[in-house]
Image: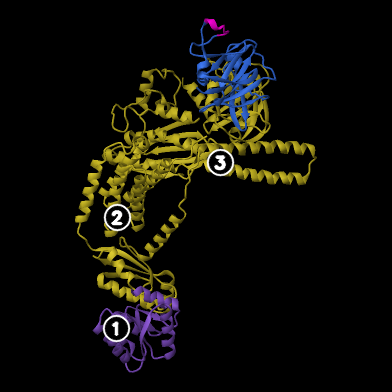
Chain colours: A yellow, B purple, C blue
Amino acid sequence: MKKEESLFDIFLYETTHLLDEMETKLLEAESNKRTNKEWIDNVFRIMHTIKGSSAMLNFKKLSELSHGLEDVYSFIRDNNIELTSEIIDISLEVVSFIKNEIETLEENGDLGKDITPLKNRIKLIFENLKNFKGKKSNYKVKIKFKKDCMMEDIRALDAKNKLEKISKVLETFPTILKGPDSCKEISEKGVSFLVNSDFKESEINNMLKKILFVEKSSVTPYEFKDLKKVEEEEEEEIEDIKDRKHYISVDVNKLDNLLNTVIELVTSRAVLEDRVLKEFNKSEEIENLFYNLNERIKELQENVMEIRMLPINRVFSSMKRLVRDMSKNENKKIELKFVGEETEVDKNIIEDLYNPIMHIIRNAVDHGIESRETRENLGKSSVGTIILKAKTEGGNIIISICDDGKGLDRKAILNKAIDKGYIKKSNREITDKEIYSLIMKPGFSTTETINEYSGRGVGMDIVYEDVKKLGGVVKIDSKENTGTTIDLIIPLTLSIVSGIKIISNNISYIVPINSMKLIFKEKREDIVKDTNGNMFIVIDNINYPLINLNSYYADSNYIDNRNKIIMLIEASEEEKFAIAFDEIGGEYQVVVKTFPKYLKKCTKSLRGLSGCTTMGDGTISYIVDVTGLALELNKKVSE
Amino acid sequence: MKTVMIVDDALFMRKTIKKMFERAGYEVVAEAENGKEALDKYMTKKPDVITMDIAMPVMDGLLSLKEILKIDETANVLMVSAIGQEELVGEALACGAKGFIVKPFTEELLMSAVDQLF
Amino acid sequence: MVKKSYMLFSIKDRYYAVNVDYIQEIINSVKILDIPRKKDYCEGIISLRGEILPIINGRKIFNIEKPNLKDDETVIILKNKEDYFGLLVEKVIDVLKIREDEFLEANAKNNIQGIIKSNEKLYKFKNYTVIVLDINFFDKI
């Protein structure tokens, strides 16, 4: 049984979340320069919280470090100072520093590395800020009067007059401060002024608070914009804060158990329905009862599965930092865009996606996107683009990393492949896609430069292995000077698949229904073999590779002569092949489960299988990995 | 205990306001029917707070306010106005009245205004 | 010294024991289903309350003859960290309470059948010599 969550666990969880939040905010501020009072308050609050909780756990160095930044942000807030890139940089550095050390806090009793250099730099920045002379700044002043105090127009006018003594009032909202209409408006929404002053925010606010019947007042710095637009923006932000999600940390084992129970429930229901409907002849009442039960259980199942799902944005957003740091280092301007970042993925696999995606992005920044001059000479925009896309399709999640860089060097790859013996100089045409997938073989790197990020040829072979562990495949496509696209196709751990049951060697399998194209009985004449022993079948005058499942899943050359059933499968538009098996069953909707670790030890190979499922009658079926089979066929052909 | 002077030409208003202050723990040390009386009594009693009606005979609230402020520019004068007296209220505020309250008002509103003065 | 509990089981005339800390449950009748390309010591897989686990045939890993499966055989469900599987045995007998110093060492005098590794522990129970299995044994099969 797991121990009670220790205080340290909670601290770690909370602090990590806060640091992530802060990093996101800092990156936002860097790219669109929006740093209003809300923003500064947030960052201040984060540092303040971390300072406090780390002090409670006696992590002195961590507390000091966050205290340093807290002071900086407090000063910025009170004196309405513009955020500089120097401050953003050091804040990001502090965030990274803490993130790196945070896991070992408990063992080491505090941050491992020396914080003195960072601390001194923060101090220096702080001193510089203090010496900065006040200048005239723009503020937005907002006042709300106490309800029913009447004659709000005069009150607003009074406020305006008082403001004019210490600033220049540039704009008023509402524009007319007179009459019953403006009274109503001010009473409901308050009054706002845009002023320019060399007084500090706090000084202005103190003056406002002395005005009678002022219930709420605020003074915030901002860039000159239309007041009304600013009002709308502020309202939007208040919305954001309201529906910010609240997280609780949950033991994943508890979720697993919950899900297992629900799955058993689904199965029990199926068996019950089956038995009952056999006992009682078709009764409409019973059918309705079961229909309702089915719907409720389906909902329950969906809800439980959803709990385990997290938006892939978690992984994507951490790439922003990486791209920022790398492109700064290499003097390239790169924009990272997301599409479908709200796509949800099971918690189990989200952790394992970091590394492969990170490797690919590193490659894209390092080797894909060209330098500014090169891009300009080629007539491309000086800013390179990398798009991170996520979408679900047929029980898989497809993550695409697409860059508009120089593309893969087809010739170099081909030559290297021949050198290493991965390809024989055969007379068969090799497609571009086949060539590009060669970079996933071990030892492939066509650049010899090593740098801080890439090391020695960041192995696409490692990416291949990582994705394979998740039961997925990698597809690579590229075009010279246009760019490269890499797709990671990974089965969603808990997906519901609609499929047809087929039987081969007395073992049942499920073929996803959207891959099925045709089913028919075998005719000997249509099957041919090539010189390598590969089988093909002719359907409507087209040759398709044929896999005899009896031999394939037995890993032997077992051939039997029974009349078989052939199914034509379409893994994707270009990948069609046929499979032969013994019997065909009905259509089922199943919950796919991945193979447990120990089970992999008990088989020689799980090739061609993407998971298993318990059927309603207590038996187990295996899900046919249509994409994997297609990939194998591709490789076979190019060998 | 804080002291109050109530300036209004209507006896009913004076009595009502007096009751409100007494309930809130203030001591009403003077009442005046017009601005002149208010000025005289101010000089002898020096109350902490003054509620000043605007429209009064002999000397109106605005003039009285100005005179009182000449004696003590930090005097806490709260103007009591009615709808329609916007101009005068605006001027009173510009001269240094600490604020204004609009008739008819609740005890709660009066007290929240007075409390804010201290 | 503390006595620890071990579950005693047998296959044919051989006796084995496993620390009960690793035993989740014991089940008697279970439907074992086939899996593709299974290794010879694996009987197949079962679904246990929604969880799928492989069943290892005790006869095969301990090299005992008579590989035929009988319906009344028992499966011991074992769990060690992430490893979760069932061991198909013939009979589950009893729980033994053994103290650390009561183990014997494997050597010729102890009259054991079968192949034993030198670091395996033995225990004398009535007339039998019981091979006490370390849970990590199953990692290395």
The residue under the point 34% across, 75% down is B117
Q: Are marks 3 and 2 in contact (CB under 8 Å)?
A: no
- Cα–Cα gap, marks 3 and 2: 43 Å
Mark 1, chain letter? B
The spot of residue A216 in percent (x, y) is 38, 67
Q: Residue furthest top?
A: C108
Please name the amino acid that badge 1 sits on: Lys
Q: Is residue A176 visible?
A: no
Query: Disc count in the image?
Result: 3
The circle on residue A305 is 3
Q: Is C45 above or below relative to A481?
A: above
On whether residue A572 falls in the magenta region, the answer is no
Query: Which of label 3 and label 1 is nearer to you?
Result: 1
SS at mark 3?
helix
Which residue was labeled with disc 1? B46
Q: Is A9 above or below relative to C32?
A: below
Which residue was labeled with disc 2? A74
Mark 2 neighbour class, 10 Å CA radius: few under 14, some 14 to 19, many 20 or more: some
Please name the amino acid that badge 2 sits on: Ser
- Which quadrant of the structure image shows residue A621? top right
Mark 2, chain letter? A
Please provide the residue range marked out in magenta: C108-114
Mark 3 neighbour class, 10 Å CA radius: few under 14, some 14 to 19, many 20 or more: some
